[in-house]
Amino acid sequence: MPSHVPPAPSRRLQRVTELLKREVSELLRRELNVQEVGLLSVNEVKVAPDLKTATVFVGFVGNRQQRSAASDKLGQRAKHIQMMLGSQLSMKWTPVLNFLLDESVEKGNRVLAILESLDQGQKPGA
């Protein structure tokens, strides 16, 4: 039974992805206030094969208020960040940016905390 393996991304797509990751990270650092939105980092960027859209997965560290503010600010500033990105890059089209808060680190921390609490619960009885 043949398994379907997606084709590897082209070198151009890989280069654009890395460039967007680096440039968007820098723009977020400059444009958003850490006290207001918490600490943000670009974990991953997925660019469509036609290079017209990109999903930016943003890692977050902060409290619930900052998380809400980060989500709001990213949505509000997406067009502005895209415009600034377009002025810095020499591409035919600047991809339309879609920001998503990446919860993978947060989920991983919860799993580690659960494992640690289970481990501590078993030691006294062992």
Image: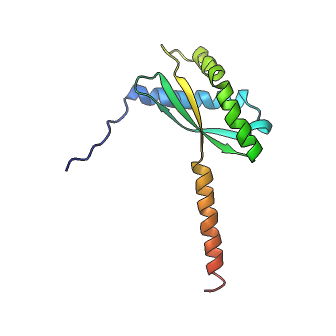
- The residue drawn where x is 64% and y is 64% is 113
- Where residue 49 sits in the image (x, y, percent)? 40, 27
Is 99 above or below relative to 110?
A: above
Tell me the quadrant of the picture where the C terminus can be found. Answer: bottom right
Is 35 above or below relative to 17?
A: below
- Where residue 111 sits in the image (x, y, percent)? 59, 61
- Quadrant in which residue 35 is drawn: top right
- The residue drawn where x is 70% and y is 36% is 70
Left or right of residue 83: residue 50: left
Is 9 above or below relative to 93?
A: below
- The residue drawn where x is 25% and y is 47% is 3
Left or right of residue 96: residue 48: left
- The residue drawn where x is 65% and y is 75% is 120
Left or right of residue 63: residue 20: left
- Where residue 95 sits in the image (x, y, percent)? 51, 22
Residue found at the far right of this picture: 35
Left or right of residue 20: residue 74: right
- Where residue 5 sits in the image (x, y, percent)? 30, 42
